[in-house]
Each structure stands twice: as structure tokens, then as C-alpha cells.
Image: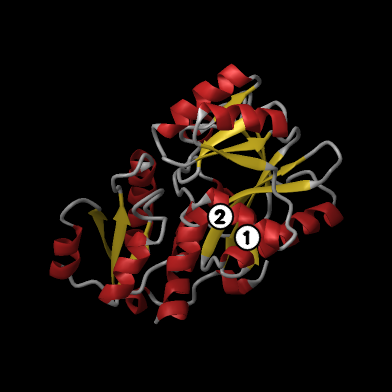
Amino acid sequence: MSANLKSTLEPKAFGRVAVLYGGKSAEREVSLKSGSMVLEALQGAGVEAFGIDVGDDLLQRLAAEKIDRAFIVLHGRGGEDGSMQGLLECLGIPYTGSGVLASALAMDKLRTKQVWQSLGLSTPRHAVLASEADCRAAAEALGFPLIVKPAHEGSSIGMAKVADVDALIEAWKGASRYDSQVLVEQWIHGPEYTIAMLRGQVLPPIRLGTPHTFYDYDAKYLANDTQYQIPCGLDAAREQELKDLTARACEAVGTQGWARADVMQDADGRFWLLEVNTVPGMTDHSLVPMAARAAGLDYQQLVLAILADSVEARG
């Protein structure tokens, strides 16, 4: 792995760093865990860092504190969807990760898929659900099984696998509690991979395994029986194909600094893009730190690399 993944900057070069975490999204608890670990790693490296649990007083905190740059560890809406990035742009505070457009686009699963389709990148067939009639039409067009997803949530929140129309309608109603826009996709039978990008490079892919129906919230953050396979088990040519697809998918969305793509492989060996996360989890169960370790970076070095990219990209 190229040496330029690691930061060569002295801790003082980052200035006073605000770690933004918590927030109000459905992923608040995950963000609190991610943010506390990032903050501890930065402080352990000698960076002058402090935390802000993002709430209604955020503007006052940003105005009152001396902040040279922000490390965004907010998952979901309000932090990963371009709104926080736009606020920091307006305030002239450099920040980690993707910009306004890429953040907003990646948070919208439907429009991300539309961009990929326009470029000929494989993503499962899908439909948008807004009524029971839509559910029946989607069942007719796509067949079963299907996976139902809120279009603007992460961490598998509100997702459900369904095998008949009645279950599809119930899953749509359940997902609607989280989001006004609900997406349904064809279920891809086969292994799931997650692939991280860091500073323009693709990290080693991870093959995921779980006894759960799919890689849900519990499997991601709580369960001890989730399997993570690194190396991922693909031969060199197929692994390179997967890496190239990830790079093209992230480039299409416009990600910057770091990101993570989720990909399925069907029984014929074809890869299918699911989504891109622009502020992936950074907990002790999270995938980007695992991939970074496989590339030779420990957790602290990973955090410093993400922060260093904000200096190089935004001054």
C-alpha cells in the first residue's frame, strides 16, 4: 500500500480541531461511539481536539470556540447529507470528508443509483414506494425476495427483507416511519463486500458474513457472530475488478477524503453496487478501521490520515 496514506503532518499543523458527533439522526448512538473514539485517538496523538455533541446550540458553539478545522463524525441526516458541510463552508471552517454535493447525493440512495445507472454501473433494479398500489406494482415488476430501505437512512435502519406482497406493504409502512421516500430493490443472492476509500486509494475489500437475514443494525454494531474476511477470498483479478468498480462508483458520486461502498456479488459472479457512505462508522465494530489495519494503518494513523486530507483539500 502506498505510503501516502499516512499523515506526515505534525499535530500542531491541524490547529484546534472540533470533533462533531452525536446529532439528532437515527444513528445518534453510533455517532456518539464513533466520535468518542476519534476524539480519544486525536488527543492521544497530540492534536488539540475537543468534542461537540451537535445539538440546537451548535451555531453558538461554533461561534464561541476557536476552531481551525472540524472532524465530522456525524452519521445520517444532519451530518452526512451535506447540511453540516454547507454550514461549515459558510463559516469558513475546513472539514473532513466529502463536500456538500457528494454528501447530499450519497445520502440519497435513489439518486445515487440513478447516477450509477446513467454511467452503466451495475446496481439492483428498484422501485419507489409511496402507496400500497406501488407495493403491488413493484412486486409484479421485480419479483421476490426484495429488500425495503428508507432512501435517506444508514446503518440498515428501517430495512427489511420481504418474500410476499403483504410483507412488502408492512415493510413499506415501517420504513415510512423513518423517511418519506422508501426504496425497494431486488434481493441479490450471494456474498456481500464492503470496500473503503482513503485519500484516493482503495483499501482491501472485506467480505461480510452473518447468520442474520442480512447485515442489519445488530450485525453491524452489537453482534459478536458477524464474520469479517480479509483477504476477502476473491482471486486477484476479481478483487481488482471489485476495487475498480468501487473507485468508479465513488468518483461518480464525487466523494473526497474517505468513504465506504457496499457491494453484492450474485451467483454468476457479477458485482452489484448498493450504496456509498461518506461518513462511515468509526466504532470498535466498524469496517473502515478494519480495512485500514489490513493496509498497515492502526486506528490513530487512520484518523490522522482522514484529518490530513482536510488540510490538503481545504487548507
Instruction: Identify the residue under disc 2.
Output: 111
Amino acid residing under circle 2 = Arg
Q: Is residue 172 left or right of residue 87?
A: right
Estimate the x, y position of residue 291 in percent, counting from the top left. Answer: 61, 52
> Dot 1 surroundings within 10 Å: few (below 14), some, or many (20 or more)?
some
Q: Is residue 57 left or right of residue 160?
A: left
> Dot 2 surroundings within 10 Å: few (below 14), some, or many (20 or more)?
some
Q: Is residue 151 left or right of residue 195?
A: left
Kindly state the secondary structure of the residue where label 1 is placed. helix
The residue at 83%/36% (across/down) is 267
Looking at the image, which is closer to me, 106 or 288?
106
The residue at 41%/56% (across/down) is 81
The residue at 33%/56% (across/down) is 39
Amino acid residing under circle 1 = Val
Looking at the image, which is closer to me, 254 or 172?
172
Q: How far, Cα to Cα, is label 2 from label 1? A: 6 Å
Instruction: Identify the residue under disc 1.
Output: 115
Estimate the x, y position of residue 160 in percent, counting from the top left. Answer: 55, 28
Kindly state the secondary structure of the residue where label 2 is placed. helix
Estimate the x, y position of residue 241 in percent, counting from the top left. Answer: 79, 57
The residue at 36%/65% (across/down) is 85
Q: Quadrant of the N terminus?
A: bottom right
Q: Quadrant of the C terminus?
A: bottom left
The answer to whether one can see residue 246 in this image is no
Q: Is disc 2 in contact with disc 1, using a CB cutoff of under 8 Å?
A: yes
